[in-house]
Amino acid sequence: MEATRGKPSEALLDVRGLTKTFGTLTACDAVDLTIGRGEIHALLGENGAGKSTLVKMLFGALEPDAGTILWKGESVTIASPGEARLLGIGMVFQHFSLFDALTAAENIMLSLNDPEPVSKVSERARELSRAYGLPLDPDAHVGDMSVGERQRIEIIRCLLQNPELVILDEPTSVLTPQEADKLFETLETLRAEGRSILYISHRLEEVKRICDRATVLRQGKVIAQCDPRRETAASLARMMVGDEVQAIVREKAAAAREALLEVRSLDRPAGHPFAISLSDIDLTVHAGEILGIAGVAGNGQGELFEAISGEVLQDRADAVCICGKDAGRRDISQRRLMGGAFVPEERLGHAAAPMMTLSQNLLLSRYRTDARALLSAFGIIRSGAVAEAAKRIVAAMDVRKSGEDPEATALSGGNLQKFVIGRELDRAPRVMVVNQPTWGVDAGAAARIRQALIDLVKDGSAVLVISQDLDELFEICDTIAVMHGGRLSEAMPISEASYETIGLLMGGARAGDPDHRPLEVV
Amino acid sequence: MLESILITVATAATPLLIAALGELVAERSGVLNLGVEGMMIMGAITGFAAALLTGSVWLGVGAAILVGAAFALLFAFLTLSLVTNQVATGLALTLFGLGLSGMLGESFVGRPGLKLGVIDIPVLSDLPVVGRLLFGQDPLFYISLLLTLAVAYFLFATRAGLMLRAVGDNPVSAHAQGINVVAIRYLAVMFGGACAGLAGAYLSLVYTPQWVENMTAGRGWIALALVVFASWRPWRVVAGAYLFGGVTIGQLHAQAQGVDIPSQLLSSLPYLATIAVLVIISRNRRLTMMNTPASLGRPFVPER
Amino acid sequence: MRLELVKRPQQSALFSAVSPLIALGLTLVAGAIMFLLLGKNPLDALYYFFIDPLLETWSLHELAVKAAPLILIAVGLSVCYLSNNWNIGAEGQFIVGAIVGSMLPVLFPAFQSWIVLPLMLLMGIAGGAAYAAIPAWLKARFNTNEILTSLMLVYVAQLFLDWLVRGPWRNPEGFNFPETRNFHAYAILPEIWPASGRAHWGFVFAVLAAVALWFVLSRTLKGFEVKVIGQSPRAGRFAGFSRARMIIFAFLVSGGLAGLAGISEVSGAIGQLRPTISPGYGFTAIIVAFLGRLNPLGIIAAGLVLALSYLGGEAAAISIGVTDKVARAFQGMLLFFVLACDTLIHYRIRLVRPLVVRAGEAKAEEVEAGHA
């Protein structure tokens, strides 16, 4: 689509009063947004602020309820992604919209408006990947690719359409700091070519670094428009989340501590074709300590969680020790009885059954440890006691919900996460293992969850946090290790770690072993 | 002797092949339609009745295809527009088809039907052994092989086929890319129904040209098993269908030869073979996981 | 126009209760249309189908006779379906239960004692459960699709029964009819109320089984386990529940109940084995299970409704001369409507006009915001 040049002062995209409602939730409430030519424009906001909804409307994937979109000064209706691409709008999705069973070239082909043979698509993709320094094998299957490679496919797919506006939704959330740097170079090249970029993020430092202007969303409304370079990270954060977020309070933990969770040379072969095999993992978490495990998604974190929680048993009893006792051959219920508590990454469908009520979901992980309180003879459920316990957790974690005992799926991500964490904290476990504690959670809930973990450690428990969010790990951990390709690095005190060293490890810098395979989980 | 056995193997295999190909396309788009048996039996009665009433076998075939597709449309409306459980809805389709065909077919029981003639390609069909096998079969035999070719070409060499596979792999991504997931699935399911209807017509117009209640006798289910057996690849369906055709005809011949095994036990061989094949295939977890369309049987509601 | 589903924040309690009734109503309407097409007076037909069988005591007994196997099988299936195990081979488990339970009176006719009947019932349960264990084990061990294996075993069981009654088990005094000898008095399941009709204790077993399973499913940890694994297998594993054990459990329960239904049918209603001992109870029970919304108490009511459709089919065949096969078509149609109406429990349905953007025109009927 050839650009018809308007007056230089005219904005490329001008959005007025765009509104989208889902049921009772107004995800976007009369949003105004103006993007000039050749600018990198940040769309800031915390999880649930309406950023994704807004860009999906701009890309034709969602239908707005009200409002106008002016493209080069003309009112347009973008009814489908195909129309968006015709106008010159390209998009790189946060949760990649790729097809694992197809090759990179086939993936790209599917988003081209004009059909072309695969061979030609491959060739053009190769040219672009050379031109922008984005290495890519068009004939490889996406299912076998790393997160970084997947993102490169999305970017090349988008650039093949020669777009004038490129939308990137949280592009760095899955990258190592070094990979992110490369991405920024690509973005600057694009800007130099006169293309505009709408850059969605909640990471303030990178926004300050590369963006020319910023629009801040909170609860579906535009709160501010500013030049991010003139703001501080703190002032941007205040715009994003308001003043309701408490700062994390930490106290120095006492020294000389017993080891509560130990993993000793844990090996686990990949259970299915898309899984990562774990090799030779050692870690120790002491009483009063938070150990953080950093890493790009899909490097074996989920597999490690399953192994430690007992969802999958080990061959050797001493591969996992909880509170000094061998747990490798014990199942998850028995490990809970030994003092363990576990919070997996997926809230809906793993930590909680979506269509079940909160009190039923309480029973899910507590029926064994609290059998005496929650069950009577013959396994009859004491529903009164269960409801009581659920209420206690709701109060303790400030879980906001509608109705007396709603289904898990009716809660927002943050509130459900507070519930599933509170469900375990309520037992005052000696060992707590949490995978991605605040993934997709709003800032208020995230702060509350982090504080709760710190408070648990203060009372002498041990906490293992697996997270992709480096800021979070640096904020709450005492020691940190990095997972890459199914291996875990040596843990180091957080005081000795820097973003750069951790970032290099996340990229696999020290994984010089021969059978290191950069497979990725879907 | 051998030649005639091979020819009957082909007639036993052809309906399985046609029905399984249709289901394969539907499953590649991510929809599990367990109603194959029901659509097939409706095709059988419609084909039989329409041929008898109009006097044209080909009108019978056409009517069977239309009814199969119409039944599939009903299934598609429920599972795709109303997002009902695909397994339960497929069962409903089968139960409804079996019941309705029994009701409609009652007046046709015992009446002699029309039979689709064979195409005899001169000279070639006189070749020894393979002559009649390859060049003297009924037209639907040739259509079934052309259909395999067409399905394979469509799925792996056309953009529309790529879109269909993409939808079966990840409907959410497909929707985000602007592919109309529901429309593609409607078409795939209806193609499956048309094939099942055609397969049913084959039974009542070629295989045994008469109407008998429940005459599909589980062939729709065996077709479903064949799709798994073939790990969703068209040419492997051919192999599977002929394997099952062989088992079916083999046990019939054994019965005819008066082998000292009760006929009922021989008749149960195709069903036992289906189980055995399913077990062998499913034991290879890696293979099944790699090949199964990732969204098979999962509901999808487009976000608008 | 296009349909658009809007997810309800909570399941609708109202539609959970009324959706089976709406489905029944729609089936009646569709049935009336069907009779009209067959050239019959729809009101007459529906009367003979659904009212006439309820007017006499003996036919109420027949209703209980037909409902007993449907309810027994369907409550077992509810455990399977709730735990996401698709056992559709109950017909085969019914047959094998009947065969195994009949071993005593057929093979040892001289063994006559009060203990024969209890042993027969237990053997029937064991036979059905063992037959169901085959697809269960294959699924738990090899991940083999249980839908296809359990169904294939139906055909095998039917052929096996056919062989037995024509071959080794044929009644030596039976003039070569394909049937076993008649069961002796100790092997007959007694009637509940012999003075007024044929209803046998199978109906009591059915109601007891339904009440017991209702309690287990709604009040105990086992029932919770069934539902968690069915709705969300990963959450089930996180809870520490074993998927493999649940597969075996669900199939054994439903196979055992199907086997009990089978032996109750032959020893209560038929009195011998024949080539065909079931008018498709095992498949109709699938419809019963869904019409009862997989709730054992609902299944009692649903079983009576479907039993009525069998009787109604016979009544309509005699009185207005439609084929009794109409009943099967009715039953299939009913399941469609049940499934369609269940959508209302989870979604609101709205009709949306195609997207035409014109000033002032609201595009969705429920959404007031128009396009500028």
Image (spheres, rainbow, N blue to C red):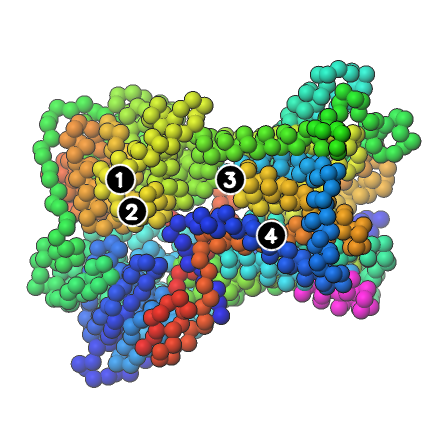
In front: mark 1 or mark 3?
1
Point 17% across, 47% down: residue: A471
The crowd level at tag 1 (other Cα within 10 Å; few <14, some 14-19, many 20+) is many
- Secondary structure of residue under mark 2: loop
Judging from the image, mark 1 belongs to the subunit labelled A
With respect to residue C320, does B122 lie above or below?
below
Which residues, given as a range, are shown in magenta? Answer: B49-66
* Disc number for residue C24: 4
Count of residue discs? 4
Residue furthest right as drawn: C175
Residue receiving disc 1:
A394
Question: Residue A13: x percent and y percent?
Answer: 25, 74
Q: CA distance from mark 2 to mark 3?
A: 27 Å
Q: Name the disc covering residue C82, or none.
A: 3
Crowdedness near tag 4: few (<14), some (14–19) or many (≥20) residues, C-alpha within 10 Å: many
Mark 4 vs mark 3: which is more N-terminal?
A: 4
* Magenta highlight on residue A18: no
Q: Chain of mark 2?
A: A
